[in-house]
Image (cartoon, helix red, strand yellow):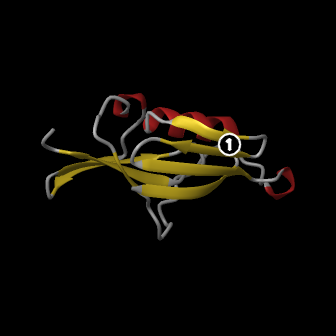
C-alpha cells in the first residue's frame, strides 16, 4: 500500500488527477484538505495557503526530487488518461512514470500477469 501526503497548489487539478489515476473515492473533503483512497493507495492533499503560493506561468517537472511515490494498481484502465513520461518492465511489473499537475513525478506499477 502506498500512502502519501502532498501539499497542493493546483488544488482542483491535483484532486481530479489522483481520483482518476487511482480510480479512487473521496473519504474526507474540506476546503483545504482531501483524503482520496482506493483499496491499495491513499493520497492526502493539503491546500497550500495563498500567501505561500508563487506566481507561475506553467508547471515544471520536479525531476530533481529525491522522492518518487509508487502506486500499485491492478488495472491499467486509467493510464490512458494521462501522458506517460517513462515506461519499463521489471521483475514482473509494468512501471509508468507520470507528472501530476503540480509537477511531482510519481510512478504506477501494474502486475505484468493479471
Tell me residue 25's x, y (percent). Answer: 53, 34
Number of marks in the rendered image: 1
The residue shown at (47%, 71%) is 66
Percent position of residue 74, x then y = 28, 40
In the current view of this chain or complex, which residue is farthest to the right? 51
User: Taking 43 as reference, is 82 above or below it?
Assistant: above
The quarter of the image holding the N terminus is bottom left
Question: Depth check: 34 or 6 in front?
Answer: 34
For residue 30, above or below residue 43: above
Q: Residues within 10 Å of mark 1 (few under 14, many from 20)?
A: some
Q: Percent x, y for residue 38? A: 45, 41
Q: At 38% from the left edge and 31% from the top edge, which residue is drawn?
A: 78
Q: Nearer the viewer, residue 71 or 37?
A: 37
Residue sitting at x 42%, y 46%: 98
Residue farthest along the bottom direction in this orientation: 66
Q: Quadrant of the C terminus?
A: top left
Is 80 on the left or on the right of 41, as rendered?
left
Tell me which residue sits at (29%, 35%) in the image. Answer: 75
Q: Is residue 51 left or right of residue 80?
A: right
Please state if 66 lies on the left or on the right of 54 as rendered. Answer: left
Residue 103 percent location from the top left of the image: 55, 50
Considering the numbered disc 1 on the image, is that residue within a helix, a strand or a loop? Answer: loop
- Residue behind mark 1: 10
Amino acid at each position: 500500500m502506498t500512502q502519501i501526503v502532498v501539499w497542493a497548489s493546483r488544488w482542483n487539478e491535483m484532486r481530479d488527477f489522483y481520483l482518476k489515476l487511482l480510480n479512487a473515492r473521496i473519504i474526507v473533503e474540506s476546503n483545504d484538505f482531501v483524503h482520496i483512497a482506493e483499496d491499495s493507495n491513499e493520497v492526502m492533499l493539503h491546500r497550500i495557503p495563498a500567501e505561500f503560493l508563487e506566481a507561475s506561468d506553467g508547471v515544471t517537472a520536479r525531476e530533481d526530487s529525491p522522492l518518487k511515490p509508487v502506486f500499485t494498481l491492478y488495472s491499467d484502465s486509467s493510464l490512458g488518461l494521462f501522458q506517460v513520461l517513462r515506461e519499463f518492465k521489471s521483475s514482473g511489473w509494468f512501471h509508468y512514470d507520470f507528472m501530476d499537475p503540480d509537477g511531482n513525478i510519481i510512478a504506477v506499477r501494474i502486475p505484468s500477469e493479471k
